Image: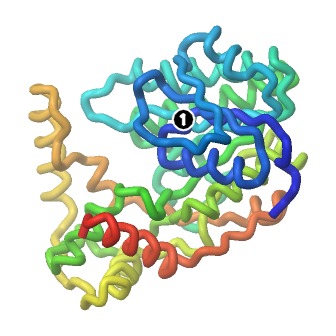
Amino acid sequence: MSKFWQGRHVLVTGAGGYTGFNLALHLAHAGGVVRAFLRKGGSARTFPDDIEVFEGDLTSIEDCRQACNDVDTVFHVAAVFRQVKGTREELEEVHVGATENMIRAARDAGCRRFVHTSTMGVHGHVKDGPGNEESPYSPGDDYQETKLEGELLALRLGAELGLPVAVVRPCGIYGPGDTRFLKMVKPVSRGRFIMIGSGETHYHFAYIDDLVQGFMLAGEKEAAVGEAFLIGGEESPTLNELVQAIASNLGMKPPRWRIPVWPVYWSGWLCEKLCKSIGVEPPLHPRRVAFFTKNREFSVDKAKRLLGFEPKVSLEDGFGRMIDWYRQNNLL
């Protein structure tokens, strides 16, 4: 492990979330003096004693300044969780407004580096994959649009203020402790999974340990400044290949049932409209269907070339570790 972080004071925003929490743990393990920025009352996670917990509001410039005091490097991971009942204004408040607060606070505190978290979703659907950092922007919803606004603001404002900024665009994050893919794994485990569409759409994953490696390299390497990096694994499987890998780890036969996309899409559209009118999260919505239709196949060669990034966990191994965690926690 690199000795770069030993004794360095680092701040991780969004440390109550899956990615931020794991990043904080890895930085502490690498010898960093870690401060975890949590939303007041927003996380039930238990942090080890060597990580300082700071509770505040990212929309408060004073809280941001206090959090950045004596900090060498800021990892800005905080984001608003996607909710259909959420508003565009709420997304902008955190993804754009809070990003500006943190950058100005980091500059005033004399921070050495600011690593901003974006998403591969800023590229939307990749027609002719694999895409890369130069692929056209094509965000598909308010979440992705405001994440793109925040990324562009971070690079522009950092350059204006003389604060070295790097951007990480994570691919689909997964690993032990994360339950987002449980809604796919559980039906496969019960022989009830139904593929929507052909299953030949690609999706690029980032195992949590590989993603954390990418973040730490972006915070360390000088070549990262002013650049954006897609961070993911070596593989961007088709959904058919993904389901086969899940079934293999479960000791199941790959499911063969499939249904056309458009009936499900319009059902999701109607479900979202009805549920939004009564203020509840819909069980089905167009964004969930988009997982089966939008191609997300990328190259991580830029991160390899400039940062020395080396993804180490294969899809088969990564999903195996995650499925083992599901079993250990009685989720399957």
Locate residue 125 relative to residue 3 in the image: left or right.
left
Locate residue 168 relative to residue 128 in the image: left or right.
right
Q: Is residue 2 visible?
A: yes
Q: Does 167 sit above or below residue 40?
A: below
Which element type, helix, strand or loop, lies under badge 1? loop
Q: How many marks?
A: 1
The front one of 38 and 149 is: 38
Q: Quadrant of the N terminus?
A: bottom right
Q: In the rendering, at what x and y percent does residue 290 appear? A: 32, 54
Inspect the image, locate mark 1, and give the three-letter code of the amino acid beneath it: Gly
Asked which colour scheme the image uses, the reply is rainbow
The front one of 31 and 132 is: 31
Locate residue 39 relative to residue 88 in the image: left or right.
right
Residue drawn at (54%, 57%) of the image: 171
Q: In the rendering, at what x and y percent does residue 160 appear? A: 82, 20
Which residue has dot 1 on it?
14
Where residue 56 sits, quadrant-wise, is: top right
Where residue 193 sits, quadrant-wise, is: bottom left
Q: Does 114 sit above or below residue 320?
A: above
Q: In the rendering, at what x and y percent does residue 294 appear? A: 40, 59
Q: Quadrant of the C terminus?
A: bottom left
Residue drawn at (48%, 50%) of the image: 124
Locate residue 212 relative to residue 248 in the image: left or right.
right
